[in-house]
Image (cartoon, rainbow, N blue to C red):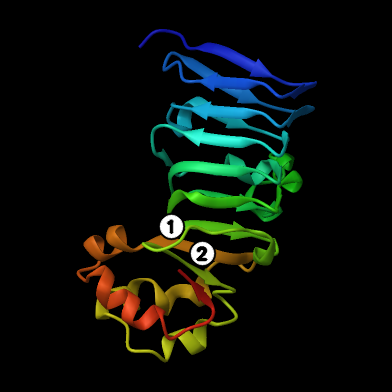
């Protein structure tokens, strides 16, 4: 593989622009001192080609054109009033300063509020250190555990499909302390854990702490 071209946005404010971050041979960095307002950010690169560090996004739209997997850099972004479209799996958003080591202080700067994920597909995505009441989560076939740690004992009391119960519900209390919400994608977890979306929904419907 050849050298990647570094495309760096930092120390500037950009408003009402469309940023196309789609070149597979580029490493994109949205970094310190960057503020985007009312911008559309189009992403079509893997997580390894996208670095977000201490950037601020206000009323922006993120259009993800290829699934973004296990991207934790959102934890070092300030997100306010943003909209998310496309597929995300294993991504974390919000305030989780303990995520980074002392040599990675930028995770102190993460936050999320007033954001809209209704046009996104989230699978195994967590929202940390935030008020989930300010967020709009995707509808079924996605579903979202609100306050999964605080409600863990109550959720364990239900009769879930066996493998899902053992792998997901029985482990909710082990999530990081700042976990405010956890969103899953029913067809994906059903396929992985030997159940069906319909069997999951039959239990989900019994709880007001699960949005779907």
Residue 6 spot, x, y in % from top left: 57, 13
Between 120 and 99, the one nearer to me in the picture? 120
Between 121 and 123, the one nearer to me in the picture? 121
- Label 2: which residue? 182
Query: 10 Å neighbourhood of mark 2: few (<14), some, or many (≥20)?
Result: many
Where residue 203 sits, quadrant-wise, is: bottom left
Does residue 96 sit above or below 56 in this rendering? below
- Tag count in the figure? 2
- Label 1: which residue? 124
Residue 139 spot, x, y in % from top left: 45, 61
Between 62 and 48, the one nearer to me in the picture? 62
Q: CB of mark 2 within 8 Å of CB of mark 1?
A: yes
Residue 183 spot, x, y in % from top left: 47, 62
Does residue 22 sit above or below 120 in this rendering? above
Query: 10 Å neighbourhood of mark 1: few (<14), some, or many (≥20)?
Result: some
Question: Which numbered disc flags the more N-terminal residue, 2 or 1?
Answer: 1
Rendered-image quadrant of the N terminus: top left
Residue for point 32% across, 81% down: 202
Label 2 secondary element: strand
Between 67 and 18, the one nearer to me in the picture? 18
Q: Is residue 65 left or right of residue 71?
A: left
Q: Is residue 136 visible?
A: yes
Label 1 secondary element: loop
Q: Is residue 71 visible?
A: no
Does residue 133 sit above or below 188 in this rendering? below
Q: Is residue 39 left or right of residue 163?
A: right
Residue 83 spot, x, y in % from top left: 60, 44
Residue for point 72% across, 40% down: 106
């Amino acid at each position: 593989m050849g050298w990647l071209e570094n495309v760096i946005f930092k120390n500037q404010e950009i408003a009402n622009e469309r940023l196309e971050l789609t070149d597979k041979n580029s490493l994109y960095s949205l970094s310190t001192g960057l503020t985007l307002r009312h911008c559309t950010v189009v992403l079509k690169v893997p997580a390894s080609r996208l670095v977000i560090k201490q950037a601020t996004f206000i009323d922006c739209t993120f259009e993800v054109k290829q699934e973004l997997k296990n991207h934790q850099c959102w934890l070092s972004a300030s997100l306010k009033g943003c909209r998310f479209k496309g597929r995300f799996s294993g991504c974390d958003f919000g305030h989780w300063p303990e995520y980074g080591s002392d040599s990675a202080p930028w995770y102190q700067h993460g936050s999320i509020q007033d954001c809209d994920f209704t046009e996104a597909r989230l699978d195994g995505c967590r929202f940390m250190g935030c008020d989930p009441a300010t967020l709009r989560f995707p509808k079924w076939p996605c579903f979202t555990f609100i306050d999964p740690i605080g409600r863990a004992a109550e959720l364990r009391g239900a009769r879930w499909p066996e493998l899902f119960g053992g792998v997901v519900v029985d482990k909710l209390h082990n999530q990081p302390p700042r976990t405010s919400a956890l969103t899953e994608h029913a067809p994906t977890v059903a396929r992985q854990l030997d159940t069906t979306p319909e069997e999951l929904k039959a239990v989900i419907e019994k709880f007001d702490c699960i949005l779907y």
